[in-house]
Amino acid sequence: MTEDRHDAVPSVYFTDVFEVSPHVLDEYGAFNIALVNDLPLFVDPFLLFDSDNETYRRLHDEIINYLCFLRDRAVADDLTSGTISHWLLFKEVKQNWLGFSKSGNSGTGLGNDFAKSLAWNLVSVFKEFGNETISAGSHIEKLGLLSGGVGRDHLSDFTTNLIKGFLLDYTQTFALAHLRANQRMRVHVERVKFDYESRRWKSGYFELPYVSGDYVLLTPKGILTRDEAWINQGDLLDRFTEVCMAVSDDALRAQVNDHFYAQITKRTKEKERRGAALRTIEKFHELLDYYIRRKEQHASDAHRQSDAKVRETEQQFVDNIKALVNEHLAGGEFYSFGASYTESLKRVHYLKQVIEDKGGHRLFYIKDKPVQRESDLHIMFRLTWFDTNLDVNAEVNNGRGPVDYKVSRGKRDASLVEFNLAKNTSLEKNLQHQVKIYEKASDTTASIKAILYFSESERLRVLNILKKLKLEDREDIVLIDASLDTKVSASKADES
């Protein structure tokens, strides 16, 4: 088969696609999104609540006002199937290219389960929402603190939908000031602003950046975070003891302690203690407000931690990937086109060469610490695999569980690519069982396993697993050395 070549690498990031200086976008305060895959950031409502920016604080007030409206409607039993559809069912705002999607930018949105869960919380557990006296304000994150609460992903999508009007205005202002007319389009957008008089969501028209058949939304870095919102259930359970100590009502504190300690013994494991803590919180909802008050009192830490997380995300998924592509991959064999298996294997080996011999390993470290999560490794790889005439889908699920990537050109030419960290405790199991299952489900026999290791002990662990499974010296299993020690030793040897 004759291979096509593309020496000119197309653009991935907003500033490249729309030919805007990264400095200009940074001065505006927006995050430089990748227009091929979601990046793992989301809006933290607490950063709106505690902001010095009056516009952000007003956005938070509007979120709470809408939740109070929903609470009142729920209490009055006004939540019919029709009103639930209009007031509680939202599509994911995919145009911001942020969130938890591992392939592209399309998530599941806010469906019936979310609507029912939110409605139940507002009419039962949180019917006093909006009238808190212990904490300084009301917080949407409160709805996700109990076991029957609203999940993190849904709270993120819901928050983004409720501030979509602001994001549209924010993006339009930048587009009119910095983009050419042929880079923008006037688009009609549904559900922009809620009219409390008519109890209906209103639509609007906006002049927005436009590419590949859809508009693009920018988001200010100052309202973004990663992993968890400042107010979250895991942190609540971590701080359960100090939250209990903060209860000013002696009688209530005694009841809380009695309820919790009646469920545990000296032999109780940590997971069981956290379960007992959650059940105690579900019985004494006042603990939620004491926890939230503490988070309000340490608000400066929220901004500092979120700023650090955004900077690290920017370095890992923007700066490092741009360096990897522009300094190592562009103009080389990485962007040659061939059959799916040939191209996949070629790209894995080219990436191996860049990481091991051309300094590319540095781009898999943040503050001298290697990539910790395979999900991050998957996103980083996907961001480099944008110049291809093949269909590349991440986390494809064909009924037998997800695989990292399925690379295909039609039904008859498909390959599977898995990227693993050597430290993955399930690596042996994955190598032994997963690929055969995936191959059967995906109607392909071509599969590649790339394993990234960061130390000699990790390398030896992988080699032992491969020997045990009799998988040594296989073409389709590629070990990639991203360790710092090896590179330092080689450098000193060259100098001598």
Image (cartoon, helix red, strand yellow):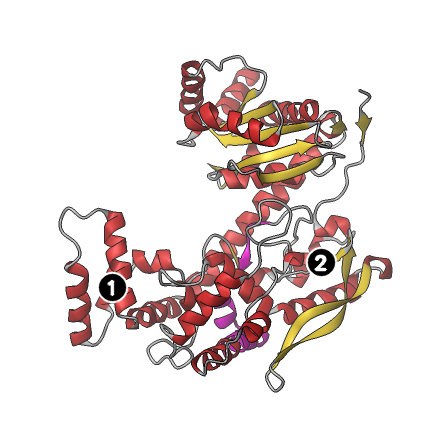
Measured along the vertical axis of the image, is residue 136 above or below residue 393? below
Give the residue at the far bottom of this rendering.
197
Magenta span of residues: 39-64
Q: Quadrant of residue 94?
A: bottom right
**How far from the left and from the top, in percent, is residue 48?**
52, 69
Secondary structure of the residue carrying tag 2 is: loop
Q: Nearer the viewer, residue 389 or 333?
A: 389
**How far from the left and from the top, in percent, is residue 161?**
59, 66
Residue hosting label 2: 216
Q: Quadrant of the N terminus?
A: top right
**How far from the left and from the top, in percent, is residue 299?**
42, 67
Disc marking residue 280:
1
**How far from the left and from the top, in percent, is residue 132?**
37, 79
Measured along the vertical axis of the image, is residue 482 above or below residue 37? above
Secondary structure of the residue carrying tag 1 is: helix
Residue 308 seen in render: yes
Residue at image coords 59%, 75%: 55
Residue 357 part of the magenta segment: no
Crowd band around label 1 with a 10 angstrom C-alpha radius: few (<14), some (14–19), many (20+): many
Q: Nearer the viewer, residue 169 or 3?
A: 3
